[in-house]
Amino acid sequence: MTIHRYDHKGTFELENGGRIEDLTIVYHCSDRPYQGPSDDRKVVWICHAFTANSDPQDWWPGLVGPGKTIDPDKYFVVCVNMLGSPYGTTSPASVMPGTDRPYYFDFPRITVRDIVNANILVRKHLGVEHIDLMIGGSIGGFQALEWMIIEPDVMKKSLVSACGARVTPWVTAYNESQRMALEADPTFRKCESLLGGQEGLRCARAIALISYRNYICYNETQSESDPDKMFADKVCSYQQYQGKKLIDRFDAYSYYCLTYSLDSHNVGRGRGGVEAALKRIKADTVVVGINTDCLFPVQEQKYMATHIDGAMYVEINSKFGHDGFLIESGPLGNIIQQLLDF
């Protein structure tokens, strides 16, 4: 897959009344350009998760790549870097027009609908009229749901996993705890460089990771080899390592921004409620739950499947909790293959 940049000149209006001037959007797509309605390849659009990027071969290698279930040589595969994410699309880390400095806290608050509307700009830019399969997990699932409601006639099939129709207080509590960690870093509000808030971001990532996994996973993978060890440190090293990994590739200001995007998610806002909004979806939809997901428990996916006309609910058993949607390539691949075959 090849990386591309689309520059949208003019004003990009936001759901909360704000605006972004001269929006830049980075995306990956199959190497062979799309030929429009005459192209005989199925279009597969992947919406990425919270801190991922627009290259699904990078973060979903078990499913995306030549010879894999989602083969970019066989299908026309697209993934757009989210608005607010620091991998090329306009974000708090971008230089604010008319200045020589990043936006930092001057970047407007964005919602999942804004992220989807940026995706739609790329869809139109590429000349894609119909998406054969829309895929999203976690906040990628938020995007897929919103998009199927905004443009119900564009999608033919969809798979959404490890997400809900509306963010819960449980998820927002995790997000606010991470924002508190960022605010506790004295460099965060100084806005002297994009390295500001790194120690806070390290802590925020460690908090988030607990919600991405679960009791079983931690106890199986992070237990001490010596049962008599007085002070356990294996899991402490793991938390520190995961925090360090993120600060090497992400900035605290974009992370802060995207936590609020998560908190904005509510497909029913302005549409007569969640159930009425879900009824607008026309795509043949498979909703996938992970049985050990403590961030988005399976009752949320079952609820969506009940209220999306004709939807099917599938549950995957995994010890990895919420991250199961990234890790369980075998079961997910089987579901995706069935959707692509028919």
Image (cartoon, rainbow, N blue to C red):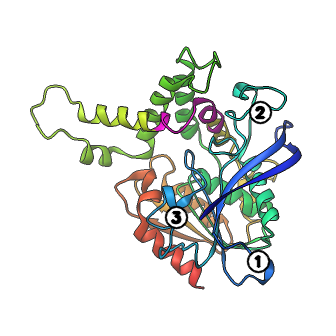
- Where does label 3 land, which residue? 288
Question: From the viewer's perspective, is residue 297 above or below residue 39?
Answer: above
Q: Nearer the viewer, mark 1 or mark 3?
A: 1
Which x, y percent locates residue 143?
A: 67, 55
Q: Secondary structure at mark 1?
A: loop
- Where does label 2 land, which residue? 108
Q: What is the CA distance from the residue labelled 1 to the residue labelled 2?
A: 36 Å
Kind of residue sitting beneath label 3: Val
- The kind of secondary structure the magenta stretch mainly shows is helix
The C terminus, quarter of image: bottom right
Tell me which residue sits at (42%, 33%) in the image: 244
Q: What range of the chain is rendered magenta? A: 246-258
Q: What is the CA distance from the residue labelled 3 to the residue labelled 2?
A: 32 Å
Q: Secondary structure at mark 2?
A: loop
Q: Is residue 253 magenta?
A: yes
Q: How many marks?
A: 3
Question: From the viewer's perspective, is residue 318 above or below residue 232?
Answer: below
Nearest the camera: 32 or 122?
32
